[in-house]
Image: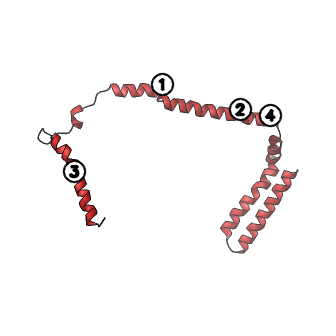
Amino acid sequence: MIAETICSAVAAAGLGIAAVTAYRKRFLAAARLAAYALVPIGLVMTGAVEWAAETAFSPVAWAGFGVLGAAWLLFLATRAVERRSGGTRKERRAAAKAARRDAVAPAASAPSLGPAARPQAAPAARKKAAPAEDFSDIEAILKKHGI
């Protein structure tokens, strides 16, 4: 009984706000507000409010919500395990089958650089001298900026 009264009051307030909005010549917004305001009245008239009030105080309904929550957790757990293991059996079979197939032209993706175009390995003396050169460049930059 109290839920129906509250819904009726909310609907009346919403329709009042819609009337004020229409008075300000904002008819589209007023029509939208009136539509929202009529929803609680419609819920009262269909009996949905009474059903919701009875459900809220029913232990069987709360147990049902608990069962739905447990089912949802099971769905989430199975998805997590499925992702961790690499997908379903069907997906794993398809991936294995694709891996068994050879490429159409395996050498086509290899770079076509000759031996002259490949970089040569730097001698050990250059590697040891490189850090000193790097620090001298940094020192020159710092001196240039007065640091």
Choose top left, top right, bottom left or bottom right for residue 139: bottom left
Instruction: Find the distance from the CA under tag 3 to the CA under tag 2.
Output: 70 Å
Q: Identify which residue is drawn at 42% across, 24% down.
A: 93
Q: Which residue is mark 1?
A: 89
Q: Which residue is mark 2?
A: 67
Q: Which residue is mark 4?
A: 60
Q: Amino acid at mark 2?
A: Val
Which of pointers 4 and 3 lies earlier in the amino acid sequence? 4
Q: Are marks 4 and 3 in contact (CB under 8 Å)?
A: no
Q: Identify which residue is drawn at 82% across, 47% down.
A: 47
Instruction: Mark 1: give few (<14), some (14-19) or many (20+) Cα within 10 Å.
Output: few
Q: Quadrant of the C terminus?
A: bottom left
Front-lying residue, 22 or 111: 111
Instruction: Find the distance from the CA under tag 2 to the CA under tag 4.
Output: 11 Å
Q: Nearer the viewer, mark 3 or mark 2?
A: 3
Instruction: Find the distance from the CA under tag 1 to the CA under tag 3.
Output: 57 Å
Q: Which numbered marker is on residue 132?
A: 3
Q: Amino acid at mark 3?
A: Ala
Which of pointers 3 and 2 lies earlier in the amino acid sequence? 2
Q: In the image, residue 51 lies at what x, y percent? A: 81, 43
Choose top left, top right, bottom left or bottom right for residue 14: bottom right
Q: In the image, residue 74 lies at what x, y percent? A: 62, 31
Instruction: Mark 2: give few (<14), some (14-19) or many (20+) Cα within 10 Å.
Output: few
Q: Is residue 135 left or right of residue 121?
A: right
